[in-house]
Amino acid sequence: MRIALAQISSSADPAANLELVREEVAAAASAGARLLVLPEATMCRFGVPLAPVAQPADGPWASALTELADAAGLTVVAGGFTPGSRGRVRNTLFARGGGIHADYDKVHLYDAFGFAESDSVEPGAEPVLLDVDGVGVGLTTCYDLRFPGLFTHLAGSGARIVVVSASWGAGPGKVEQWRLLARARALDSTSFVVACGQALATEDHGGAPTGVGHSVVVSPDGELLAELGEEPGRLVVDLDPALADDVRAVLPVLLNRRF
């Protein structure tokens, strides 16, 4: 399966960000990708009030994303915000195109390193597994990367590839943690981990997690296959899902787990 990752730097303007998505969909389609992964908060960066930005999953922004993906003939995963309850929003991954219309609401909220995502975001409750060309693809978002149980659950449900869309918070050691966690989750789940983050922000937005770059692709045996730097950029990788089966045959951690 050919997968494209688009490490962008989104702004606070959803319309401008949709134009970025348009460019990345065209580039991914031109490269022959079947799946395009964009970061968390592609619709709008963190650091601004999110309630005025949020739209329903069938609203104008997600509908435009669907049209772009369908026209290009591939599946696109991109982060946005949908309305929640009591004035909060949901941090939602939209998966559109290629016969897929699914949404994943981020389960683990980033209440860490002095940031409280739960002040403005309502958590989701259910994992989401896609079928992309017959391959199970799990969806996760940013802080989810620190929770191995979600990855092993997705793998146990049929995922051989797990996508991570992120807007990773900057700080000492955070890039090293991002890289280490991606490799660890690949080993935990014996799955490919395809982790696409926002590029490093050029301005501080009140300490909001606005990205560090370093999107990575990791094999089911923990090998780092590809990595970007901190600037905006693109990756295109060819992954053989059967490798996950091969690794699981010799490293059956999913079968051997007891808790």
Image: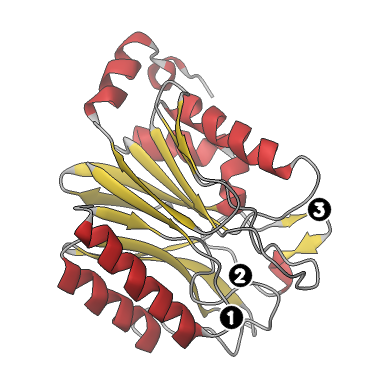
Residue 17 position (above or below residue 91):
below
Residue at 27 percent of width and 23 percent of height: 243
Front-most of residues 124 and 201: 201
* Cα separation between marks 2 and 1: 7 Å
Front-most of residues 110 and 98: 98
Whether pointer 2 and pointer 1 mark residues with C-beta atoms closer than 8 Å, the reply is yes
| Of pointers 3 and 2, the one earlier in the residue sequence | 3
Q: Which residue is mark 2?
A: 122
Type of the residue with mark 2? Glu
Residue at 35 percent of width and 66 percent of height: 24
* Cα separation between marks 3 and 2: 19 Å
The kind of secondary structure element at disc 1 is: loop
Q: Nearer the viewer, mark 3 or mark 2?
A: 3
Whether pointer 3 and pointer 2 mark residues with C-beta atoms closer than 8 Å, the reply is no
The kind of secondary structure element at disc 3 is: loop
Q: Which residue is mark 1?
A: 85
Residue 180 position (above or below residue 50):
above
Q: Is residue 206 left or right of residue 181?
A: right
The kind of secondary structure element at disc 2 is: loop
Residue at 57 percent of width and 43 percent of height: 145
The location of residue 122, given as percent across then percent down, is 61, 70
Q: Which residue is mark 3?
A: 113
Packing grade of label 3 (10 A; few <14, some 14-19, many >=20) is: few
Type of the residue with mark 1? Ser
Front-most of residues 19 and 130: 19
Residue at 59 percent of width and 90 percent of height: 52
The location of residue 29, given as percent across then percent down, is 21, 61
The location of residue 49, given as percent across then percent down, is 68, 84
Q: Quadrant of the N terminus?
A: top left
